[in-house]
Amino acid sequence: QVHLVQSGAEVRKPGASVKVSCKASGYTFTSYTITWIRQAPGQGLEWMGWISGYNGNIKYAQKFQGRVTMTTDTSTSTAYMELRSLRSDDTAVYYCARLGGAPPDVWGQGTLVTVSS
Amino acid sequence: DIVMTQSPDSLAVSLGERATINCKSSQSVFYSSNNKNYLAWYQQKPGQPPKLLIYWASTRESGVPDRFSGSGSGTDFTLTISGLQAEDVAVYYCQQYYSSPQTFGQGTKLEIK
Protein backbone atom coordinates (compact mmCIF):
# COMPACT_ATOMS: atom_id res chain seq x y z
CA GLN A 1 0.00 0.00 0.00
CA VAL A 2 1.20 3.47 -0.87
CA HIS A 3 2.11 5.69 2.09
CA LEU A 4 3.73 9.05 2.66
CA VAL A 5 4.83 9.54 6.28
CA GLN A 6 5.89 13.00 7.37
CA SER A 7 8.05 14.17 10.24
CA GLY A 8 6.54 15.48 13.45
CA ALA A 9 5.34 18.89 14.52
CA GLU A 10 7.86 21.71 14.82
CA VAL A 11 7.99 25.01 16.68
CA ARG A 12 10.28 27.76 15.46
CA LYS A 13 10.98 31.38 16.27
CA PRO A 14 10.57 34.07 13.61
CA GLY A 15 13.59 34.20 11.32
CA ALA A 16 14.49 30.56 11.83
CA SER A 17 14.29 27.68 9.36
CA VAL A 18 12.42 24.39 9.34
CA LYS A 19 12.96 21.20 7.36
CA VAL A 20 10.08 18.75 6.93
CA SER A 21 10.60 15.21 5.67
CA CYS A 22 8.26 12.95 3.72
CA LYS A 23 9.14 9.25 3.48
CA ALA A 24 7.49 7.27 0.70
CA SER A 25 6.73 3.57 0.67
CA GLY A 26 4.73 1.12 -1.41
CA TYR A 27 5.70 2.50 -4.82
CA THR A 28 8.75 3.31 -6.93
CA PHE A 29 9.85 6.70 -5.61
CA THR A 30 11.67 7.68 -8.80
CA SER A 31 8.56 7.18 -10.94
CA TYR A 32 6.66 10.04 -9.34
CA THR A 33 6.93 13.67 -8.36
CA ILE A 34 6.38 14.97 -4.83
CA THR A 35 4.44 18.18 -4.37
CA TRP A 36 4.22 20.32 -1.23
CA ILE A 37 1.04 22.11 -0.19
CA ARG A 38 0.34 24.04 2.98
CA GLN A 39 -2.77 25.02 4.91
CA ALA A 40 -2.84 27.81 7.47
CA PRO A 41 -5.19 27.28 10.44
CA GLY A 42 -8.79 27.45 9.28
CA GLN A 43 -7.72 28.43 5.79
CA GLY A 44 -7.55 26.89 2.31
CA LEU A 45 -4.84 25.01 0.45
CA GLU A 46 -1.76 26.71 -0.98
CA TRP A 47 0.53 25.00 -3.50
CA MET A 48 4.22 25.52 -2.79
CA GLY A 49 5.93 23.57 -5.54
CA TRP A 50 7.07 20.15 -6.67
CA ILE A 51 10.21 18.09 -7.13
CA SER A 52 10.67 15.14 -9.47
CA GLY A 53 11.69 11.91 -7.83
CA TYR A 54 13.17 10.86 -11.17
CA ASN A 55 15.61 13.65 -12.00
CA GLY A 56 15.28 16.25 -9.24
CA ASN A 57 13.66 18.85 -11.49
CA ILE A 58 11.98 21.50 -9.39
CA LYS A 59 9.22 24.06 -9.74
CA TYR A 60 8.56 26.51 -6.90
CA ALA A 61 5.61 28.83 -6.54
CA GLN A 62 6.85 32.36 -7.11
CA LYS A 63 5.64 33.36 -3.65
CA PHE A 64 8.23 31.06 -2.04
CA GLN A 65 11.14 31.56 -4.45
CA GLY A 66 14.33 32.29 -2.51
CA ARG A 67 12.91 31.00 0.78
CA VAL A 68 12.15 27.36 0.02
CA THR A 69 14.33 24.43 -0.98
CA MET A 70 12.94 21.04 -1.97
CA THR A 71 15.22 18.03 -2.17
CA THR A 72 15.01 14.27 -2.41
CA ASP A 73 17.10 11.34 -1.22
CA THR A 74 16.35 8.48 -3.58
CA SER A 75 18.35 6.02 -1.45
CA THR A 76 15.76 6.37 1.31
CA SER A 77 12.75 7.39 -0.83
CA THR A 78 12.45 10.59 1.17
CA ALA A 79 11.58 14.10 0.09
CA TYR A 80 12.42 17.22 2.08
CA MET A 81 11.07 20.75 2.17
CA GLU A 82 13.06 23.48 3.91
CA LEU A 83 11.53 26.90 4.51
CA ARG A 84 13.76 29.74 5.74
CA SER A 85 13.24 33.17 7.27
CA LEU A 86 10.05 32.00 8.93
CA ARG A 87 7.32 34.47 9.79
CA SER A 88 4.22 34.08 11.91
CA ASP A 89 2.09 33.72 8.78
CA ASP A 90 4.08 30.60 7.85
CA THR A 91 2.29 28.83 10.69
CA ALA A 92 0.47 26.04 8.87
CA VAL A 93 0.11 22.34 8.28
CA TYR A 94 2.52 21.34 5.54
CA TYR A 95 1.55 18.39 3.35
CA CYS A 96 3.54 16.35 0.88
CA ALA A 97 1.64 14.48 -1.81
CA ARG A 98 2.41 12.17 -4.71
CA LEU A 99 1.98 13.56 -8.18
CA GLY A 100 2.08 11.43 -11.31
CA GLY A 101 0.67 13.17 -14.38
CA ALA A 102 -2.63 13.86 -12.67
CA PRO A 103 -3.44 15.67 -9.42
CA PRO A 104 -1.96 14.55 -6.09
CA ASP A 105 -3.48 11.18 -5.29
CA VAL A 106 -1.75 10.16 -2.05
CA TRP A 107 -1.09 12.64 0.75
CA GLY A 108 1.05 12.57 3.84
CA GLN A 109 -0.58 13.08 7.20
CA GLY A 110 0.64 16.66 7.46
CA THR A 111 3.23 18.41 9.64
CA LEU A 112 2.22 21.35 11.81
CA VAL A 113 4.82 24.09 11.81
CA THR A 114 4.23 26.79 14.40
CA VAL A 115 6.16 30.05 14.19
CA SER A 116 6.01 31.97 17.42
CA SER A 117 8.30 34.13 19.52
CA ASP B 1 -1.93 32.51 -12.02
CA ILE B 2 -5.28 30.79 -12.62
CA VAL B 3 -7.81 31.87 -10.00
CA MET B 4 -10.32 29.23 -8.89
CA THR B 5 -13.60 30.46 -7.44
CA GLN B 6 -16.06 28.12 -5.75
CA SER B 7 -19.70 28.70 -4.97
CA PRO B 8 -21.30 28.66 -2.54
CA ASP B 9 -18.89 29.12 0.37
CA SER B 10 -21.14 26.93 2.52
CA LEU B 11 -24.07 24.66 1.88
CA ALA B 12 -26.59 22.82 4.06
CA VAL B 13 -28.41 19.87 2.51
CA SER B 14 -30.81 17.31 3.98
CA LEU B 15 -29.77 13.68 4.23
CA GLY B 16 -30.59 11.83 1.04
CA GLU B 17 -30.82 15.01 -1.03
CA ARG B 18 -28.47 16.32 -3.70
CA ALA B 19 -25.58 18.71 -3.05
CA THR B 20 -24.10 20.77 -5.87
CA ILE B 21 -20.84 22.72 -5.66
CA ASN B 22 -19.59 24.92 -8.47
CA CYS B 23 -16.06 25.87 -9.45
CA LYS B 24 -15.04 28.48 -11.99
CA SER B 25 -11.52 29.03 -13.31
CA SER B 26 -10.25 32.40 -14.52
CA GLN B 27 -9.00 30.75 -17.72
CA SER B 28 -9.66 27.47 -19.46
CA VAL B 29 -8.07 24.36 -18.00
CA PHE B 30 -8.92 22.28 -21.07
CA TYR B 31 -5.95 20.92 -23.00
CA SER B 32 -7.09 20.27 -26.56
CA SER B 33 -4.18 17.99 -27.50
CA ASN B 34 -5.45 15.26 -25.19
CA ASN B 35 -9.06 16.43 -24.77
CA LYS B 36 -8.75 16.62 -21.00
CA ASN B 37 -9.80 19.14 -18.39
CA TYR B 38 -7.09 19.50 -15.73
CA LEU B 39 -9.53 19.86 -12.84
CA ALA B 40 -9.76 17.85 -9.62
CA TRP B 41 -12.05 17.75 -6.59
CA TYR B 42 -11.00 16.95 -3.03
CA GLN B 43 -12.83 16.23 0.20
CA GLN B 44 -11.25 17.29 3.50
CA LYS B 45 -12.53 16.31 6.93
CA PRO B 46 -11.25 17.99 10.14
CA GLY B 47 -7.76 16.94 11.11
CA GLN B 48 -7.23 14.96 7.90
CA PRO B 49 -5.40 15.62 4.65
CA PRO B 50 -7.49 16.20 1.54
CA LYS B 51 -8.76 13.11 -0.22
CA LEU B 52 -8.86 12.99 -4.01
CA LEU B 53 -12.40 12.35 -5.27
CA ILE B 54 -12.46 13.32 -8.94
CA TYR B 55 -9.77 14.06 -11.55
CA TRP B 56 -9.87 15.00 -15.25
CA ALA B 57 -13.06 16.82 -14.17
CA SER B 58 -15.21 13.68 -14.22
CA THR B 59 -13.14 10.56 -13.44
CA ARG B 60 -13.81 9.10 -10.02
CA GLU B 61 -10.79 8.01 -8.03
CA SER B 62 -10.73 4.32 -7.16
CA GLY B 63 -12.85 3.56 -4.10
CA VAL B 64 -14.88 6.78 -4.23
CA PRO B 65 -18.63 6.07 -3.99
CA ASP B 66 -20.58 6.61 -7.19
CA ARG B 67 -22.82 9.18 -5.52
CA PHE B 68 -19.93 11.60 -6.19
CA SER B 69 -19.78 12.86 -9.77
CA GLY B 70 -18.00 15.66 -11.58
CA SER B 71 -18.94 17.53 -14.73
CA GLY B 72 -18.06 20.58 -16.76
CA SER B 73 -15.44 21.73 -19.21
CA GLY B 74 -13.27 24.73 -19.98
CA THR B 75 -13.85 27.13 -17.12
CA ASP B 76 -17.02 25.89 -15.38
CA PHE B 77 -17.21 22.74 -13.31
CA THR B 78 -19.59 21.07 -10.88
CA LEU B 79 -19.27 18.48 -8.14
CA THR B 80 -22.53 16.70 -7.40
CA ILE B 81 -23.20 14.47 -4.41
CA SER B 82 -26.38 12.48 -4.98
CA GLY B 83 -28.07 11.09 -1.90
CA LEU B 84 -26.13 12.94 0.77
CA GLN B 85 -24.92 10.82 3.67
CA ALA B 86 -23.78 11.94 7.10
CA GLU B 87 -20.16 11.02 6.37
CA ASP B 88 -20.10 13.49 3.46
CA VAL B 89 -19.91 16.44 5.86
CA ALA B 90 -16.61 18.04 4.94
CA VAL B 91 -14.97 20.92 3.10
CA TYR B 92 -14.68 20.40 -0.66
CA TYR B 93 -11.99 21.97 -2.83
CA CYS B 94 -11.48 22.17 -6.56
CA GLN B 95 -7.95 22.39 -7.98
CA GLN B 96 -6.57 23.11 -11.42
CA TYR B 97 -3.40 21.25 -12.41
CA TYR B 98 -3.25 22.74 -15.92
CA SER B 99 -0.44 25.11 -15.02
CA SER B 100 1.85 26.05 -12.14
CA PRO B 101 1.04 27.28 -9.56
CA GLN B 102 -1.59 24.56 -9.23
CA THR B 103 -4.23 26.66 -7.55
CA PHE B 104 -7.16 25.65 -5.38
CA GLY B 105 -10.59 27.10 -4.84
CA GLN B 106 -11.32 28.64 -1.45
CA GLY B 107 -13.35 25.64 -0.33
CA THR B 108 -17.05 24.90 0.21
CA LYS B 109 -18.21 23.73 3.61
CA LEU B 110 -20.96 21.11 3.35
CA GLU B 111 -23.23 20.50 6.32
CA ILE B 112 -26.41 18.57 7.06
CA LYS B 113 -29.63 20.55 7.21
Image (spheres, helix red, strand yellow):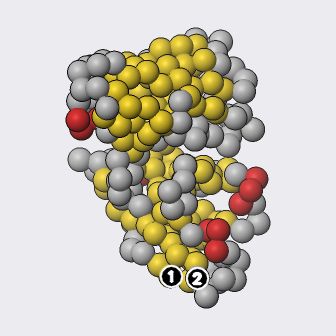
The local secondary structure at tag 2 comes to: loop
| Residue A3 image offset from top left, x and y in percent | 31, 53
Q: Earlier in the sequence, mark 2 or mark 1?
A: 1
Above or below for A88 versus B42: below
**Which quadrant of the figure has residue B47?**
bottom left
Q: Amino acid at mark 2?
A: Ser
The local secondary structure at tag 1 comes to: strand
Visible in this render: residue A102?
Answer: no
Above or below for B65 versus A112: above
Q: Which mark is residue A116?
A: 2
Dots 2 and 1: beta carbons under 8 Å?
Answer: yes
Q: Amino acid at mark 1?
A: Val
| Residue B44 image offset from top left, x and y in percent | 39, 44
Local crowd size for mark 1, using a 10 Å CA cut-off: few (<14), some (14–19), many (≥20): some
**Which quadrant of the figure has residue B14?**
top left
Residue at the location (52% across, 76% down)? A114
Q: Which mark is residue A11?
A: 1
